[in-house]
Image (cartoon, grey):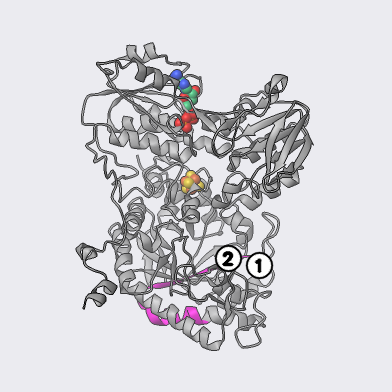
Amino acid sequence: MSRDPRHDILFEPVRIGPVTAPNRFYQVPHCTGMGWLRPRTLAAMRGVKAEGGWGVVCTEYTSIHPSSDDLPHPSASLWDDSDVRAHALMTDAVHEHGALAGVELWYGGARTANMMTRLPSMDVQSAPNLAGHPYQTRAMDKADIRTFRHWHRRAALRAREAGFDIVYVYATHGYLVSNFLNPRINTRGDEYGGSLENRVRLVRELIEETKEAVGDRCAVAVRFSADEVAGEDGTPIWGERREMFAMLADLPDLWDINIADYSLEMGVSRFVKEAALEPYMAWVKSVTSKPVVTVGRFTSPDTMVGQIRRGITDFIGAARPSIADPFLPRKIEEGRLSAIRECIGCNICYSGDSLGVPIRCTQNPTMGEEWRRGWHPEVIPARTSEARVLIVGAGPAGLEAARALGARGYEVMLAEATRDLGGRVTREAALPGMREYIRVRDYREQQLIDMPNVGIFRESRLTVQDVQDVGADHVAIATGARWRPERFDEQVYLPIATGEAVARVLTPDDIMEGRLPEGPTLVFDGDGYYMGGVIAERLRAEGLEVTLCTPDDSVSRWTVNTAERWRVRNHLMRLGVGIETAQSLAGFDGREARLECVYSGREKIIPAVNVVMVTARRPEDALYQALLAEAGADGLPFTLARIGDCEAPAIIAAAVHAGHRYARELDAVLDIDLPLRHDRIDVGAEATAPGLWTRGAAE
Ligand code: ADP
Ligand code: SF4
């Protein structure tokens, strides 16, 4: 197959100052939870993107000096020669495939408390830390500004030495440089504050100095916001931005444009759809002659072409679409559109950085596993035996196991109890805002259609006897999990009602299966991720009076890791959902719910004739346990495994990963003591030598 000529424009080379991008696919800087801590993992991951056809591949935010340290969120760094060597792993991996490597030089300012280095953070003014730590910044004086420019220049020189082709001046996202631009923040009385010209001065100097330092070989890009402050979605508040932009318009070699509202720019699909930045970009290209890149969670090549033809952008910027499918450009080039693994907009990738662990992706189980497990998103080792594999259950785990095993060439039978494949994603995707989650199923179902070695058996609820009759060599049980009606008090599961009220205690499974209640309903969210809020919204859409109650201090607590917590609560409040935080559900009698403050124990009564318990899930592993029980002295005539939620209920990404891991490891020789490579600072054999203090004492 070859590409559709309509998409040719996406494959045109584009000049960026002294360098040329081979096409218009541009992986903008995105965090990975790897940073300076895991350079090999990082380099392999970025290299795979270049291999997949991204013409430009950038790092994450890269600290220029120890006074900008974001741990526990791992940024990259360019502080010294060791960093240069670490980045060279990445630039080499990217260059190997003909792509350009970009680096985003970064200084946090009031967003970082420097918890590791313990140096005071600096910003335009003395301001409280914006991540909520009880630290304030030091107000920069002119000597500090001079020193900062020196650090920036030094980092740019190191970037060039490390082999980067594009060096960023990072002037958005509330970090230091953007605060200098901000008229509300920057009211300094010196030549760096107050007037528009003064506020733009630092960015201008950084661009000029970076160009002077490395511009012979590297392009200089600026990351800049198209609007002034966050307003209603899709309604830009431009303020003086256009004027500011016009003052700098042709100074850098490339503009990387985003917007003031990070929760829209990086929006989850529940609230934000493809190409959401377009209304903000309207004027940008008319002001500069330099190439422009912007993002929009683009996965449709037609939308991409439209963005370029209509003059919105020159490059198709992507973070998430490149994570979900590092081979997206290649697939478009080869005309294999149905093979694209489309991002579902869940932001699980972002949670890696939030939590300080390597990036993961719901759609792409190989993300972050390129180096430590040697997994490639498109290449999987061929089977090593003629074995036949039975997979029971076609949720995310079963579907991914079948797809990956099918790709390895195994003969696979996939049995699913219901008519529809997809398990939990099929059910959850029917809930409000969750439509894009169906892509987890659709991508895999589409792939399976083309695999003659995979048989799909719908409406086939298998029993122990059925499994035995199939005569497979390997059996994987992927039968999922169901929500429990109890609450969990951190030690045991407790029933919440007795007598007739028991029938009025529902779970998300009841709601998803269409058993909708009537009358005032309390949704008790002890889970803390998206399900509680989504169920509340679903019931509100039926016109019910709904209260969402959680023992946490905030609504949908865990969604802070996916950059959507503010939106979730705002949305529920707008819908008229009542909110009770820091309240545990102590009892329910069919008329009232008895809440208990988690701090004081004080009781509160809420009228409710139903409760929906969103607490925990019970693994549906009865088939697995029954098969094990059948094993007897001779064992089973097949290997038996359980995967996904039926093994340990978790997020969808975990089930997809479990299915993929099962497929990769089948027939493989694996060291069970160390099943993956450990990327960390290797101190070598000297580690066993006495430390400095010991040696000092002995001498
Ligand atoms: P996971 O997230 O681990 O993939 P899901 O709950 O999404 O789990 O999917 C489990 C799937 O297994 C569901 O589609 C369910 O209908 C199916 N299933 C459960 N029990 C059986 C069984 N005995 N035979 C076949 N399919 C089953
Ligand atoms: Fe997209 Fe979710 Fe993967 Fe992130 S984790 S790239 S949002 S599918």
* Viewport quadrant of the C terminus: bottom left
Name the spot of residue 27 as percent of width and height, x first: 43, 57
* Label 2, residues with CA under 10 Å away: few <14, some 14-19, many ≥20: few
Under tag 1, what secondary structure?
A: loop
Q: Is residue 218 magenta-colored?
A: yes
Name the spot of residue 43 as percent of width and height, x first: 33, 58
Residue underneath mark 1: 228
Residue depth check, mark 2 versus mark 1: number of the one nearer the observer: 2
Q: Quadrant of residue 58?
A: bottom left
**144 lies above or below 1:** below
Q: Is residue 193 visible in the rendered structure shown here?
A: yes
Identified at 64% across, 32% down, the residue is: 613
Q: Is residue 239 magenta-colored?
A: no
Q: Quadrant of residue 598?
A: top right
146 or 266, which lies in front? Answer: 146
Under tag 2, what secondary structure?
A: loop
In whole angstroms, how far apart are the C-alphas of marks 2 and 1? 26 Å
Identified at 44% across, 71% down, the residue is: 117
**117 lies above or below 522:** below
Whether tag 2 and tag 1 are in contact, CB under 8 A, the answer is: no
Which one is earlier in the sequence, the residue at label 2 or at label 1?
Answer: 2
Identify which amino acid the numbered label 2 is placed on: His
In the rendered structure, the answer to whether residue 223 lies left or right of residue 517 reads: left
Q: Quadrant of residue 634?
A: top left
In the rendered structure, the answer to whether residue 174 lies left or right of residue 238 reads: left
231 or 596, which lies in front? Answer: 596
Name the spot of residue 138 as percent of width and height, x first: 57, 79
* Viewport quadrant of the N terminus: top left
Residue underneath mark 2: 133
What range is drawn magenta here?
Answer: 205-227
Identify which amino acid the numbered label 1 is placed on: Glu
